[in-house]
Amino acid sequence: MIGSPSELRVLGVEEMYACDRAAIDGGISGDRLMEAAGAAVVREIRKRWTARGVLILCGPGNNGGDGFVVARKLSEAGWPVRVALLGTPEKLRGDAALNARRWEGPIRPLEEAEPESADLVVDALFGAGLARAVEGPAAAILREIGDRGIPNNALDVPSGVHGDTGAVLGTAIAARLTVTFFRLKPGHLLLPGRDLCGETVVADIGIPPEVLNRLTAPPLYENAPPLWVPRFPWPRREAHKYSRGHVLIAGGEETTGAARLAARGAMRMGAGLVTIASPPAARSVYATSMPGALIREDSSPEVFRDLLSDRRKNAILLGPGGGVGEPLRRRVLAALETSRAVVLDADAITAFQGDADRLIRAIHADCVLTPHEGEFARLFETTGARLADARCAAAKSGAVVLLKGPDTIIAAPDGRAVINTNAPPELATAGSGDVLAGMCVALLAQGANAFDAACAAAWLHGAAAAAFGPGLIAEDIPEMLPTVLRNLEADA
């Protein structure tokens, strides 16, 4: 397990530039950083391949400079190396120009790269700071490498991947290995960039971690236990069912499975008590299938409000199978009026489509929204940049926003955010989101703050699904939680 939140920090492109400048201001030359970057790439390549013909594609900036270092060091190690440059050596500047001069071999124009004669490619064309579409000779050579299936190694990010969003700008091809420096960028974790990076290695090139203290923007992290496990609500020896929190779940009448899955997730996540508020017609379904839960009749929003009068019910989940309409909206607003912890999922979000301001006015700090992409768009504006969208929605609503997907993002109103990357594709199954909502509300009931609860639930959800593996259905996720929690506690 990675040992500190600092190691999980993810840097936007401008933040990475700022860290480079801070390191240089602190006395580490740009040439030294470039030399260390190239050496790190060579180490990783030589761990995976024996000597063979290598084509190194260099771009017109510092990424190309790193490529020239790689060329020199591989050649010194006895590898046959060819270098092709986008542009001309005369137009290179600074450390990139210096390292191009140190390369003693020929430099071909990119158009004459001849990838068909290479056994391995090193892509040092464009780094994470690329801001326009890859086109022309660069796009053509990348496509040819991809079509031929030549193993490709990328410096920083695969050329064409936007460092801040993971989007493809024009053309990008998959790498077998991507070596980046100091810290990951969002484009390494967000799709489709994450899938194009292949195996990703973060290399230490001598930038001191203290430069992170100079950054002023709200931090972004890759989600992992060190971010939240120091505050995880492990049961204490003196605990009893009431001290471990009482979750209230609003159950639906027709789609009862959603609330039942959420309740199971909440139980396995450690909630001391779970009550399902059931429509009269569904009470027998809940009662016979959920022997560990309390079932209370809920025939109207007024009756639901009465259920809320018991303040021991300290965390409330609405939305799974709830059905959209004014009755659900009234229940949601009643729950938020209590100022207790609230998770709004699925129908509880969709119910406010076209009336988002009404919901936003009622939200308080202990609220978590757990939409998927479609539900998110019913409340908030979308730009296609998921990280920025989630952060904007959290700031606007005042809630922690857990935007579900294969690259789930959790954003807090103060701008903090994490990207969750451990979810296996098997989680794309009906009901898995209901379990996640139940896990999240259970952590809130046990005293976790909203951001920690959302981060921990998302990671544990992915870990449980990965532990089960192929054939996963939503019912399996809660049953894997004891194993995952046991391992987590042992590691912590």
Image (spheres, rainbow, N blue to C red):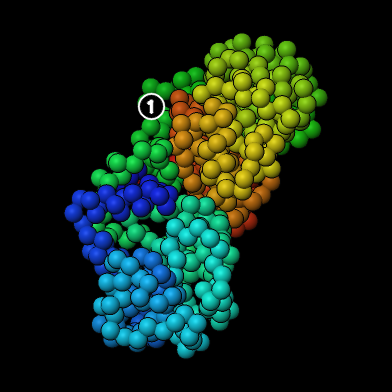
Q: Quadrant of residue 278?
A: top right
- Give the residue type that dot 1 points to: Arg
* Image location (x, y in percent) of residue 388: 54, 43
Q: Residue at x 64, y 36 (%)?
A: 380
Q: Is residue 237 left or right of residue 320?
A: left
Residue located farthest toward the front when viewing the structure as drawn = 90
Question: Whole-percent x and y of residue 442?
Answer: 53, 30
Examine the rendered structure and indicate whether residue 266 appears above or below residue 472.
Answer: above
Q: Nearer the viewer, residue 433 or 466?
A: 433
Above or below: residue 453 compared with residue 335: below
- Local crowd size for mark 1, using a 10 Å CA cut-off: few (<14), some (14–19), many (≥20): few
Report the front residue among 255 and 270.
255
Q: Is residue 257 left or right of residue 46?
A: right
Locate residue 454 relative to residue 321 in the image: left or right. Answer: left
Q: Quadrant of residue 27?
A: bottom left
Q: Where is residue 260 drawn, in percent x and y?
A: 67, 34
Question: Quick one: which residue is furthest to the bottom in this view?
Answer: 117
Please give the residue where the numbered disc 1 appears in the rendered image. 236
x%, y% of residue 345? 64, 33
Residue 375 in sight: yes
